[in-house]
Image (cartoon, helix red, strand yellow):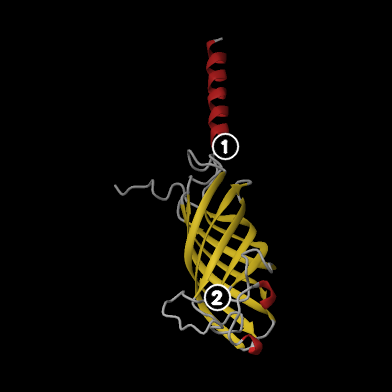
Amino acid sequence: MMTFRRSLCTLILLITAVAAFAQWEDEYRMEIGGGVGMMSYEGDYNGSITSNMEPMGSVLLRRVFNPYMALAATASYGKLKGSLRDVATYYPEQQNLPVSFSNQLADLSVRYEYNFWPYGTGLDYRGAKRLTPFVFAGLGVSYADTSDGSVFAGNLPIGAGIKYKMGARLNLGVEWAMHFSTSDKLDGVVDPYGIKSTGLFKNRDCFSALQLTLTYSFMAKCKTCNNDKDD
């Protein structure tokens, strides 16, 4: 009888240990995926942040440092569209300006992301939450194909969003970013106000992007790499 009880206790302990181990998930260092959404031009030819929104797509690669911080590289493609009919401003040289434009735009950005709450399933990091808001900022470069020729410009992307952990490896996100450009040529028209710019982002064209993203986590962290100590 005593042997049976010991065997039963041992079996219960083994089952508990295996279950606890099975519930513990890996932490992953990388994410890869993409996004779809809308891109909007902000400049001399647009009177509203929601006017002339055009479809866009992106690919995303994210390096996760810990549940709070990550570094992401994004490549996006969309279209900037605007018209003089959307603004009430009179331009001195309006008769010489194109009435409207529709320019293709490609953007490559690197950004730092900060999660307000530790991000995860709760089984990979104690106290982690599946849902967390986050903010980001970085540096980027844009290429626009305009009626006045090709334009390359730097930009400063700043934005915010929400991440949701759908599973151990699937991540769903919604984000919005404003890209402050260093160029006034993204719409093909330079300084229609006739005012000389004296600042890096003053009197420049900008664009915003609202998108839904889906990424897949990979490259699991080694749990025992830091546990071995030299004798």
Q: Is residue 84 above or below residue 32?
A: below
Q: Is residue 209 above or below residue 186?
A: above
State the CA–CA distance, disc 2 to disc 1: 50 Å
Q: Is residue 166 above or below residue 208?
A: above
* Element under disc 1: helix
* Residue 90 occupies quadrant: bottom right
Whichever of labels 2 and 1 marks the residue nearer the N terminus, that label is 1
* Residue 97 occupies quadrant: bottom right
| Residue at 68% in and 62% down | 36
- Percent across and percent down for residue 128 are 50, 41
Q: Tell which of 152 and 110 is nearer to you.
A: 152
* Element under disc 2: loop
Q: Tell which of 140 and 178 is nearer to you.
A: 178
**Numbered circle sitting on residue 23:** 1
- Percent across and percent down for residue 171 are 61, 51
Q: Amino acid at mark 1?
A: Gln
Query: Which residue is situated farthest in the top direction here?
Result: 1
* Mark 1 surroundings: few (<14), some (14-19) or many (≥20) residues within 10 A: few
- Percent across and percent down for residue 127 are 48, 38
Q: Classify the position of the N terminus by image quarter.
A: top right
| Residue at 66% in and 88% down | 95
Q: Which residue is mark 2?
A: 205
- Percent across and percent down for residue 187 are 61, 80
**Numbered circle sitting on residue 170:** none
* Mark 2 surroundings: few (<14), some (14-19) or many (≥20) residues within 10 A: many
Q: Amino acid at mark 2?
A: Asp
Q: Is residue 124 above or below residue 189?
A: above
Q: Tell which of 55 and 6 is nearer to you.
A: 55
Judged by depth in the image, the label closer to the viewer, 2 or 1, is 2
* Residue 210 occupies quadrant: bottom right
Q: Tell which of 181 and 10 is nearer to you.
A: 181
Q: How many numbered discs?
A: 2
